[in-house]
Amino acid sequence: MILAIDIGNTNIVIGCIREDKTYFIERISTVRTKTELEYAVDIKTVLDIYGIDKKDIRGGIISSVVPQITNTARRAAEKILGKQVLVLGPGVKTGLNILIDQPGQLGADLVADAVAGIACYPVPLIIFDLGTATTVSVIDAGKNYIGGMILPGVRISLDALTERASQLGGISIEEPRRVIGKNTVECMKSGILYGSTGALDGIIDRIQEELGEEATVIATGGLAGKVVPYCRHRILLDEELMLKGLQIIYNKNMQSL
């Protein structure tokens, strides 16, 4: 098995995975001021909770959109594993053909999502990653990454609303009792949830229209499970997509050494 770590702006996803099995997926908070030792303790604690012996882990890989802590997390993982940890970035083989204006700007997380999507699902693909931001990746019928979208995440939208309206606060992302709210809390819950699902459904329609064909639609990320069930389009929920992609990329690079 390998240790896969995805560093996002809000959470760090930690998991152990092999070709036929995911042992666990956990999230810890992204804290830019943490030291190498503190992240090492976090990683060791998660492994201990799931009874994972570091001797059974053959290596690790990290994807990150937070450059300030990438090397800190890498050194922390290597301290625990005593093995090399690969960082997804320039020079790392992915096998992904990226057809955008500046391929180097594509986030490591989106690369991993796309690699796993192509390996596991029929193309063309639309991949939603619902995290701090909601990102959309589009892979065409030729398995090329042709572009996507970035829009405010569900939590960002809710936080922005409550911060600017002093009487609105303490709203969770959950299904309201009705679409047409009868009080402030119900109105906010309905607006956030169905506004988000409406955005996803509308984006799917427009992308498929531009592609000229139907696409397989996948959703991943920390908030996907709360939103996807209420969408009208058929969207496949795959919470392990990122880890699957990191495993594929790790294997591709280790085999070439």
Image (cartoon, grey):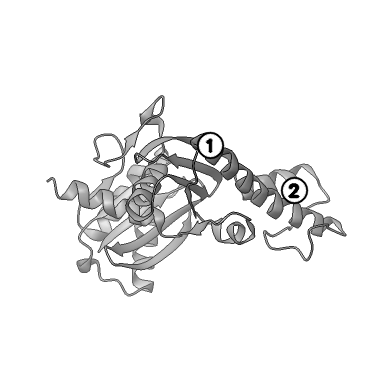
Judged left or right of residue 234, residue 8 is: left
- Which residue extends farthest top? 101
* Residue 40 placement (x, y as % from top left): 34, 57
Q: Quadrant of residue 140?
A: top left
Q: Identify the element where label 1 is drawn.
A: strand
**Marks 1 and 2, how far apart at CA:** 25 Å
* Residue 12 placement (x, y as % from top left): 44, 53
Q: Nearer the viewer, residue 116 or 140?
A: 140
Q: Tell me which residue sits at (64%, 59%) in the image.
A: 230
- The amino acid type found where label 2 is placed reads Thr
- The amino acid type found where label 1 is placed reads Met
- Which residue extends farthest front? 212
Q: Nearer the viewer, mark 1 or mark 2?
A: 1
Q: Tell me which residue sits at (17%, 50%) in the image.
A: 254
Name the residue carrying label 1. 149
Task: Count residues near mark 2 (Cα–Cα under 10 Å), then give few for <14, some for 14-19, many for 20+.
Answer: some
**Contact (Cβ within 8 Å) of mark 1 with mark 2:** no
Q: In which quarter of the image is residue 79?
A: bottom left
Q: Which of 45 and 207 is in front in this view?
A: 207
Q: Identify the element where label 2 is drawn.
A: helix
* Residue 63 placement (x, y as % from top left): 36, 46
Judged left or right of residue 74, residue 198 is: right
- Which residue extends farthest bottom? 51
Name the residue carrying label 2. 162
Q: Nearer the viewer, residue 244 or 155?
A: 244
Q: Quadrant of residue 49?
A: bottom left
Q: In this picture, is 2 found above or below 249?
A: below
